[in-house]
Image: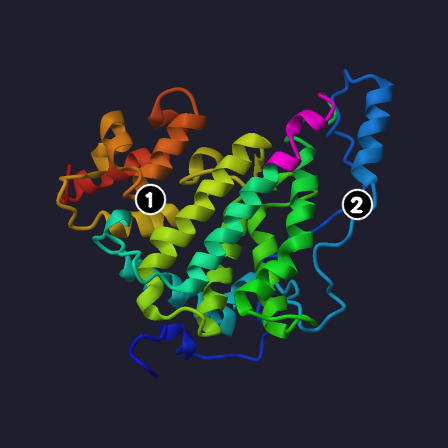
Amino acid sequence: MQNNEFVTKRPTGPIPTTVRPDFTTKRPTGIPTNVIPTTMSSQLRQQASEQETVSQPPIHDFTDPEVPSKRIKHEEDMRTLPQTQAYLILDHFIKELNQAVMGKRCSDLNETNLNPIIVKCIEILDTCEQLLDEYPTSNVQPGLSRYGNLAFRDWFGRICKESDGFMQSILSEQGQLSWKAKELSAYFKESFGNRTRIDYGTGHEAAFAAFMCCLARLNLVSKNDGFALVAKLFTRYLKLMRHVQLYYKLEPAGSHGVWGLDDYYFLPFLWGSSQLIGNDLGLKPSSIHDHTTIVSNENDYLYLAAIGFITQVKKGPFAEHSPMLNDIRYVLVLLNLTT
């Protein structure tokens, strides 16, 4: 194994025969009775029901054995997941990226010799953001949905439609889809939320991490690209999803409320905290309460950018709407590690 390869090429530990899990979400049909406000007129209610149940092409073709399929279906699957090959691979990959960004600012990245694959992926995300203009929220009659804007489904459907072509461009392939393109496309499509529920959460964020991991497994990126994957590609993905989240008013998927770090994201705090190790700006956990510090450094540090976004979308005292993040400071003080 070459020195610049990701360790995820050969994960250690017991590898059972369990097939890889993915992050595919269920796609229930029909519309729950509690989606439409009771005060809505019967005409609007009928229009909402018709729009909800309109036949849409499936996100994945699960009849194709080369397309990743859902394997986590029961509580027992969650207990065996940590011993699966897929878990070990993704876990090692995330940890390696954590090491790659340790003590580094995003602006430390030298983009002179940026991997063309990363450049191509960023261009694809740019295209995805441009497509938002083709599916404006104004096209949806107000009141058709209590949660989220239904125009999200049209944008999401367009992303799914273009996904295979996007992946072929990354792989420089033409004609029939290869298993590589199918694998990449499956995780890519799952990165943007749930079309039926109009929500987004850490499972979708994890799907994008799996997408980047697949790039590594296919030798399209090397360990030398680890810093760029986080500082350039992942930050571009975050920028897109925050735009989508605000524009279509996506609901948090599986949020734990105040008992979670954040309603939508997790990795910015993991990789972002690694960035802050040994920083030369004197940044500490208490810096999250200094608005000036956040604004001045959020482009360099994922953690501060995540805090800045939370303060943008949530109102009230930080300690009330984000107690877990707030308490990190006091835990470290008690341990005499920082202030």
Front residue (pair 286, 13): 286
Q: Is residue 289 above or below residue 111?
A: above
Determine whether, in the image, residue 245 is placed left or right of residue 141: left
Locate residue 326: give its quadrant: top left
Image point (46%, 53%), residue name: 122
x and y, in percent, of residue 317 in the image: 35, 21
Image point (24%, 56%), residue name: 102
Residue 151 is inside the magenta segment = no
Q: Amino acid at mark 1?
A: Leu
Residue on which disc 1 sits:
302
Front residue (pair 294, 154): 154
Magenta region, residue range: 133-142
Determine whether, in the image, residue 61 is placed left or right of residue 148: right
Mark number displayed over residue 29: 2
Locate residue 184: give its quadrant: bottom right
Image point (78%, 52%), residue name: 57
Q: Amino acid at mark 2?
A: Thr
Determine the CA span between mark 1 and mark 2: 37 Å
Colour scheme of the picture = rainbow
| Within-10-Å neighbours for mark 2: few <14, some 14–19, many 20+ | few
Whether residue 74 is visible, yes or no, is no
x and y, in percent, of residue 221 in the image: 41, 68
Q: Is residue 139 above or below residue 5?
A: above
Q: Is residue 278 above or below residue 222?
A: above
Residue 138 is inside the magenta segment = yes
